[in-house]
Amino acid sequence: MTALVVLERVTFTYAGAVRPALADVSLEIAAGDVMAVTGESGAGTSTLLLVATGFAPRVVGGTLAGTRRIAARRCGVVFARPWTQLTGLCSTVRDEVAFGPASLGLPRAAVLAAARNAMETLHIEQLAGREPSHLSGGELQRVVVAAALAMRPDVLALDDPAAELDPEAADALYDVLPVVAAAGTGVLLATPDSERAGRVATRAVALASGRIVAEGSPAEVLTDTEVARIARAAGCPPPYPWDVPSLLRRVER
Amino acid sequence: MIGYVDGTSPLHRAHPYTTLALSGALLFGAFALTRPLEVGLLVLTAVLFAATGRVLRSSAQTALLLSLPIWILLFVLHGLLGAEPRMAFGPVALSVPGIARALVLGGRVTAIVLGFLTALATVSPHRLVEAMTADGVPFGRTFLLASTLTVLPRMRERATQILEAQQCRGLRLGGSIVARLRALGPLALPLVLGALAEVDEQVLALDARGAAGSARRTALDPPPDSRAQHALRWALLALVAAAYAWKFWRMRG
């Protein structure tokens, strides 16, 4: 598969910071990947998203060392706080979602089609005529994801995208990610939700103090699930089973 | 009330450039008019402008509230320190030319503020963005102007949220002026710091959605313009130019 982003021993330090937010990070994101990124607060997961999508240091400042190759033409990014990602210039959800394609200078019909498709993917067609600033946090979260998708990004980075969603809406959002990836997008997903990430991710990395401490399949890396916690509490030796089927396999053995 | 108010008045329906041109004519016209009667007519025009936009009551109230301290200052300064002759007003003798000067300056300020508030209340930022986009104005300039129109309502909304949150935590707003001033700290600090923190994410979100791109943005629903409105805008420009020409001709005479 085509590598969209390659990081080789990348270290990134924010302007004015003493310690790097990312240290010696190497990874590759290919088309069709759904890569889950986990780590405790301050581990550098959000920074990894910004570095992998090219926004750091270009937009946020700071210094980058190491090798970074971004073959993706367009990168989309979605943050946990959806209200900060509204343009503040659009009076309807349709216009908010269409903002990105309109910025590309596409013909009007193509812009509206891209917005419609993105809204259908996120199941928010019924919100099209609503004022974005009057939406609930959950509705807004889906609107900003749709707005990022409408750009048809080669790489889509999502930082805790279900933070504002109820469990049902969170499930629905995570279910969309493999569909997006199947269309050729590389998805980078920073989340503390190992359960849902494990369900949709094809690969996973765990960060601690800006360094990759584990990399591999979701089963190998996403060990902070309910099942793993129960197994740990029960005195089960590592590696811990991360979901019910793997727990059953261990018990059968 | 400061900020856009949804409505169907002629000013709301007019092309945004036309409403802004009317407001601009009040602003520039104010400095060309130098006699109390002329400025009185200017204030009357500003009142008619607000009435046409059906925002007279709210805009006039705010305009008076904002310009009242200036009126008081002008009357005190020019009335007491102005040139002879003087007229007795109870125990004080006020300068007649000083009072006339204060009327001119105060009238100008009121007309400008009322015109600006009316434009704020009747020009939809979204329609303005669409109009500017249709004209091929670079997004940076469009964003700058539209943000100026939306910054006050957004800050007010945010301030209300912070105020409610702080009151839930025991902040008391009543009492003496000193106590009220002291209560400003817990309001102003989160307001400013929160706005600064969110700006970073908004810049990233706008950048990710192609706002900084070089392509000419597609306007989705540009507001309709007409030959009559176009002619009116040119006529306003000519009127302001004529007012300045008259002012300089009088100065020379």
Image: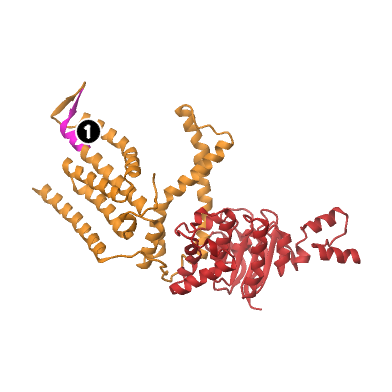
- At mark 1, the secondary structure is helix
The residue located at (49%, 29%) in the rendering is B174
The residue located at (53%, 47%) in the rendering is B194
Q: What residue type is labelled 1?
A: His
Q: What stretch is highlighted in magenta?
A: B92-102
Q: How is the image coloured?
A: by chain
Residues B215 and B36: in front is: B36
Measured as percent of width and height from the top left, residue A105 is found at: 44, 72
Within the magenta stretch, is there residue B208? Answer: no
Residues A80 and A150: in front is: A150
Measured as percent of width and height from the top left, residue B239 is found at: 19, 56
Tell me which secondary structure the magenta stretch mostly adopts: helix
The extreme bottom residue here reads A1
Which chain is rendered orange in the image? Answer: B
The extreme right residue here reads A253
| Residue occupied by mark 1 | B78
